[in-house]
Amino acid sequence: MKKIISVMLCIAMLFTSFSLVSFAADDDMKIIVANDLHLSAKAYKPYTGNTQTNAWAHVASSGQLIIESNAIITAFLEKAAESDADFILLPGDLVDAGAEEEHLLMAAKLATFEAETGKSVFVVPGNHDFFKSDLDFFKATYSAFGFSEAIAVNENNASYVAELSGDFRLLAIDSTIPGDSKPEIDADELNWIKTQLEKANADGKKVVAMMHHNLVEHFVLADMIHSSAVVPSAELADVLADGGVKYIFTGHTHDQDIASHTSSAGNVIYDVVTNTLNAYPCTYREVSFGKNAVFTAKYIDKVDTALIPAGLSDEAMALAESNFTEYSKKTMWIGLRKTFTGYTNAKALINLLNIDPEADPDMARIITSLGDKLAESIQMPFYGADGNNLSALAAKYGKTLPTSEYSDLIDLAINLYQAHCVGDEYYPANSTEIQLLMNGVATVLCYCLEDVSAEDYTAVLRFVINWTGADVPEGLLGFAGSSMERIEGIDMLVTVVLRPLVTEFTTDSSPADNNVTLEGYEKLSGFEAFVKKIGDFFRMIFEFFKKIFSFVPMA
């Protein structure tokens, strides 16, 4: 069965690729997009932490390369200078702490780049850019990077319109609220955008957009993992798609993903999120627009380590010098390990789950009572000869953990998150990783809930279902909470609710995230449109068999 499906997948991929590349035209415009650069003042000062006892003491809890940001941005600008792209788009979070000092440093780097290359840089702000500075300072500091050459500027924020090459025009949208990480597109901004699109259409222009926050949700768990990531405007996606915008470049979530939205009128827009430049795998994009839109993922895999501040350990510097990609991967792992471990105590978990102790005292009480067992089991090693491991605990509840190289649940979760950041992730339901994660989570829940009252047990099931937004009938929930054995009820929760959500996060759907060819702004000839329809059909077949393949039992 698996061989038949594999053959069908190969056929579908072949026809899909053929339809996308058969009619590639000469490039009308080529751009580079880099997100969330997070230039930090710390990148210019010696590190003074204790690296004698911890060679990786400098690593931020986020896993981002804050201290290395100057070296990374310098390497990026050098690569951009060598590219044949004429325009560089930077959709927000140019700096890390939002300090005026950082903005001046960034603006100076961009000014030097433009002067030396003749290429044009365009920016919009992100939420980090306003942590310690205001809108007027931002627009004045980055005047030369979009605002001074703009043909239209929204005086109320940092949105503007600028001409690119040929018939292309840039719509730069400011989605920020200064002093707040939440996005906003108010009615005045929406009307301003509509006006600019009407003018562009009247002028025969093809509009490419950029914005810091996401236009659409990219996966089911997005709002839980990245709160307030998507602009709250219910109309914006339709307005852009119906106004002729096929592509908008966004950031903020540090993901590598491409998702589409189809308006009620049937027009399609792609929201292209590019991962942060200053964390593994240090990604940026080159995009060529012609008859097709061709996306190519690029990486910063080497930096001038002389630009990394003094004070880091010899071990860290040696890895940064020999293999910067592995350095960035290890840095992210260490940082996320700190973060994920921090969520294993009851107080942090209550905050993470947005539980208000006054509004929901019962759930706060339950989480507090389970704190020690939860922290113990989540960090318990998967395997070991002494019996004090999650495999032995799983056996107590009739479960088996598949053999793997992962150390514990946190290590596995970091790997899955890193894969999502890289893009084109593929860990379907039948993979070792998802089986290990689901059986591991089920074991933790069985262990933590085995001694709680029936009422508390049902309350936990109900909370998890409501928190994930799963559609589970109350009758089935009551049945799982009262009539079934607890192990069976937890298995139902994991199978029906958690596994579909997790696999939606760990298995990318079409289109591909990194290297992919999509429709351009040019109208296709009749034959080209016919071949495109064939390609669309085989992409549907590819997605169908991909899902079927994910449920084929492992050998």
Image (spheres, grey):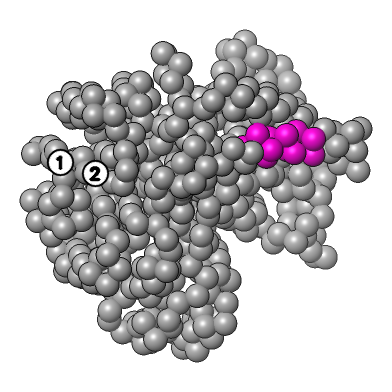
Q: Name the residue nearer the viewer: 529 or 329.
A: 529
Q: Residues within 10 Å of mark 1 (few under 14, many from 20)?
A: few
> Which numbered dot is residue 518?
none
Q: Residue at x 73, y 21 (%)?
A: 484
Q: Is residue 26 left or right of residue 197?
A: right
Q: Name the residue nearer the viewer: 432 or 523.
A: 523
Q: Is the N terminus in the top left, top right, bottom left or bottom right quadrant?
A: top right
Q: Residue at x 36, y 30 (%)?
A: 245
Query: Magenta span covers which residues?
Result: 9-20
Q: Is any part of residue 553 visible from this angle?
A: no
Q: Earlier in the sequence, mark 2 or mark 1?
A: 1
- The picture places residue 126, in percent across and down from the top left corner, at 27, 49
Residue 192 lies in quadrant: top left
Q: Residue at x 40, y 57 (%)?
A: 85
Task: State yes or no: residue 356 in magenta.
Answer: no
- The picture places residue 441, in percent across and down from the top left corner, at 66, 42
Q: Amino acid at mark 2?
A: Glu
Tell which residue pokes out farthest to the top in this image. Answer: 475
- The picture places residue 91, in percent across and down from the top left corner, at 32, 49
Q: Are marks 2 and 1 in contact (CB under 8 Å)?
A: yes
**Element type where label 2 sits in the image:** strand
What residue does disc 2 label? 163
Q: Is the C terminus in the top left, top right, bottom left or bottom right quadrant?
A: top right
What residue does disc 1 label? 151
> Height in image: 455 above or below 507?
above
- The picture places residue 369, in percent across and down from the top left corner, at 51, 42
Task: State yes or no: residue 13 in magenta.
Answer: yes
Dominant secondary-structure state across the stretch colored magenta: helix
**Element type where label 1 sits in the image:** loop
